[in-house]
Amino acid sequence: MKYKRITLLCGHYGSGKTNVAVNMALDLKRRWENTAIADLDIVNPYFRTKDSRRLLEAAGIQLICSDYAGGNLDIPALPGQMYALTDDRSLKAVLDVGGDDRGALVLGRLAPAIVEENDYQMLAVINRYRPLTRDAVSTLQVMREIEYAGGVPFTGIVNNSNLGEETVPGDLLSSLSYAGEVSRLSGLPVVCTAVKESLYPQLEGKIPDLFPLRLQPKIG
């Protein structure tokens, strides 16, 4: 997996973008000392990057998130440290952005600086096994809505088609044509196909750019 200074991950609810974000931050940390992950999803309080705080802190990854994330008080507040993402160019970061067009609105505050610097990748996390993204046309519509709300165009696709712990190799293999069609319609490359670590050995060599995931507790 190749990274820009800022890697943004967006996708519909249940796409698994938060789990992908945590794993990409861990992967990035192996290559770059000054690494951060930011939870900018202020719409969905149920699957939060903060759930993996201990793992991230143990790896030496800076976590930027709302003080209220993961608590009993759900307030759509943004962390004050988020401007470090654009101001500190020695920092490489993974951003977990909201799960739909409303969630992506928060990205608008950072979008001008991100686009001006032009050292980013905006990745659409797609999952053919979720109700609203079962086909390429529906998935593309969701992507366009997110782009419009966030003000940052997508640059690539992460195929994260899965059925959680019930996923078997055939589920990933059968999703390749779907991801390929999303790629064809959008004109964007599939930068990787994510798969839980236990299935990686069975699919290695069968799927290009395979990205292993360590599934995190409470993350969708």
Image (tube, rainbow, N blue to C red):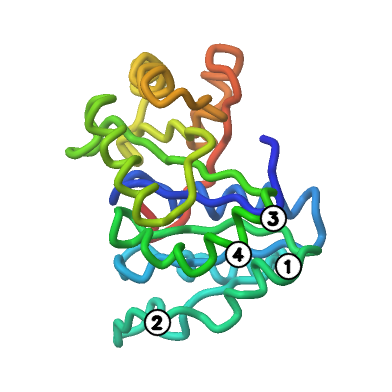
Q: Mark 3: which amino acid? A: Glu
Under tag 3, what secondary structure?
helix
Determine crowd level at label 1: few under 14, some 14-19, many 20+ residues with C-alpha closer than 10 A: some
Quadrant for the N terminus in the image: top right
Q: Earlier in the sequence, mark 1 or mark 2?
A: 1
Residue placed under numbered mark 3 in the picture: 117
Q: Earlier in the sequence, mark 4 or mark 1?
A: 4
Marks 1 and 2, how far apart at CA = 25 Å
Q: Mark 2: which amino acid? A: Ala
* Res 77 label: 2
Residue 6 picture location, percent across and down:
64, 54
Q: Are marks 4 and 1 in contact (CB under 8 Å)?
A: no
Under tag 4, what secondary structure?
helix
Residue 18 picture location, percent across and down:
45, 54
Q: Earlier in the sequence, mark 4 or mark 2?
A: 4
Q: Mark 4: which amino acid? A: Leu
111 horizontally vs 89: left or right: left
Marks 3 and 4, how far apart at CA = 30 Å
Residue 212 picture location, percent across and down:
57, 36
Residue depicted at 58% across the width and 74% down the height = 82
Marks 4 and 2, how far apart at CA = 24 Å
* Res 208 label: none
Q: Residue furthest left?
A: 131
Residue placed under numbered mark 4 in the picture: 55
Q: Earlier in the sequence, mark 2 or mark 3?
A: 2
